[in-house]
Image (tube, rainbow, N blue to C red):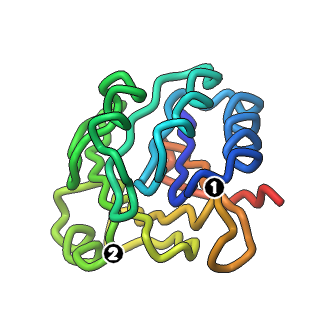
Amino acid sequence: MLIGIMSDTHDNIPLVKKAIEIFNEKRVGYVIHAGDYTSPFTLKLFKELQCKYIGIFGNNDGDKLLLLESAEGNIRNQPYIFTLRDRRIVVMHEHHVVDALADSGHFDLVIYGHTHKADVRKVKNTLVVNPGEVSTYLYGKSTVALVDLEKLEAEIVELN
């Protein structure tokens, strides 16, 4: 199964639309957002996804109650731990414990955001992925990640 990962969208509507278009074109089976949507109106775009999505709150998410309502329950607090296609996944926003989680051996995939810098690497048998920023507000480069869950391989895809 191919999954899409995004983070730090920060209300950049045109680039969120572009990310969703790419996820739909690639026929991803699931999308994971690693936090910092910022405002609830951004979540209206997620209705265009042709698959399910889940996300977590980031440090810049404002009205969490309205975000949760707009996401129809698809946003969780961090860390969010779940299993997808027999892969154990943990999603964080901040990066502070990512290496410890990966090194623990408890997860197949550790996803994080917050730094706005793309990161794909292996720690022992765990794939670590930060998709970078959709927004371009810090580094001017809009990116998402595509992860093949069976092979545990990821690629960063530029949007702009």
**Is 4 positioned to the left or the right of 158 in the image?**
left
Q: Which mark is residue 25?
A: none
How dense is the environment of label 1, judged by Cα within 10 Å: few (below 14), some, or many (20 and up)? Answer: many
User: For the C terminus, which image quadrant?
Assistant: bottom right
Residue that mark 2 sits on: 95
Q: Tell me which residue sits at (55%, 61%) in the image.
A: 131
Q: Nearer the viewer, residue 148 or 15?
A: 15
Of marks 2 and 1, which one's residue comes earlier in the chain? Answer: 2
Residue 38 locus on image (x, y percent): 47, 53
Residue that mark 1 sits on: 144
Q: Tell me which residue sits at (41%, 54%) in the image.
A: 35
User: 37 above or below 131?
Assistant: above
User: 141 above or below 90?
Assistant: below
Q: Quadrant of residue 103?
A: bottom left
User: In the rendered structure, which amino acid carries the disc numbered 1?
Assistant: Val
Q: Tell me which residue sits at (41%, 27%) in the image.
A: 70
User: In the rendered structure, which amino acid carries the disc numbered 2?
Assistant: His
**Is 44 positioned to the left or the right of 106 in the image?**
right
